[in-house]
Image: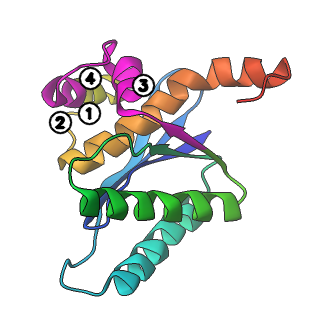
Amino acid sequence: MFVLGIDPGLSRCGYGVVETDGRRPIAHALGVLRTPPSAPTPKRLAGLQYEIRSLIQEFSPSVVAIERVFFQVNANTAIGVAQAAGLAMAEGAAAGAEVVEYTPNQVKEAVAGWGAAPKDQMIRMVQSLLGLEKPPKPADAADAIAVALCHLAHAPSRAAAKAAGVAL
């Protein structure tokens, strides 16, 4: 199963692609999609859409897991994050992938075992879980790959719920 994790953002959108064979997750790609803040928003969104679509075409993920916009102090930042998340959702659904969202606390709980885990602990856990020689960087990419790992942790219970006819 390939999972594309997305840490949405309009200026910086983290992505991470993880595959599992049922035992250990394997990282295939991670990075950050960037758009210039000086460009008009429609052009930035079009560029981000193109890049997300390209990732989906390259890796054919069965799942696109997105960090849910949970809380933002700055309304402009929240709008950009929501727009980027919406693009990822739409592109994932259009490609036939399952699209799921996880809150930051769900991601931290699944990856580090504690919903209030600090960023450095999350980065170390991602490094450990994936067997990486170096900590994943930049932080947006590490966050995105953590979202993908969160989905892998939740996948068995989601599958059981689906088999039991429970709506998710």
Mark 4 vs 2: CB contact within 8 A: no
Identify the residue under disc 2: 135
Amino acid carrying mark 1 in the image? Leu
Quadrant of residue 113 in the image? Answer: top left
Residue located beneath label 1 in the image = 132
Amino acid type, residue under disc 2 in the picture: Pro
Quarter-of-image position of residue 83: bottom left
Mark 4: which amino acid? Answer: Met
Q: CA distance from mark 2 to mark 1?
A: 7 Å
In terms of secondary structure, where does tag 1 sit? Answer: loop
Q: Is residue 58 above or below residue 67?
A: below
Query: How busy is the neighbourhood of tag 2: few (under 14 within 10 Å), some, or many (20 plus)?
Result: some
Write down the residue under mark 3: 106
| Residues tagged 1 and 4 counted as in contact (Cβ below 8 A) | no
Q: Earlier in the sequence, mark 3 or mark 2?
A: 3
- Spatial CA distance of label 4 from label 3 is 15 Å
**Crowdedness near tag 1: few (<14), some (14–19) or many (≥20) residues, C-alpha within 10 Å:** few
Above or below: residue 81 compared with residue 70: below
Marks 1 and 4, the one that precedes in the sequence = 4
Which coloring applies here? rainbow
**SS class of the residue under badge 4?**
helix
Residue 160: image x %, image y %?
75, 17
Marks 3,2: beta carbons within 8 A: no
The Cα–Cα distance between marks 4 and 2, rounded to whole angstroms, is 9 Å
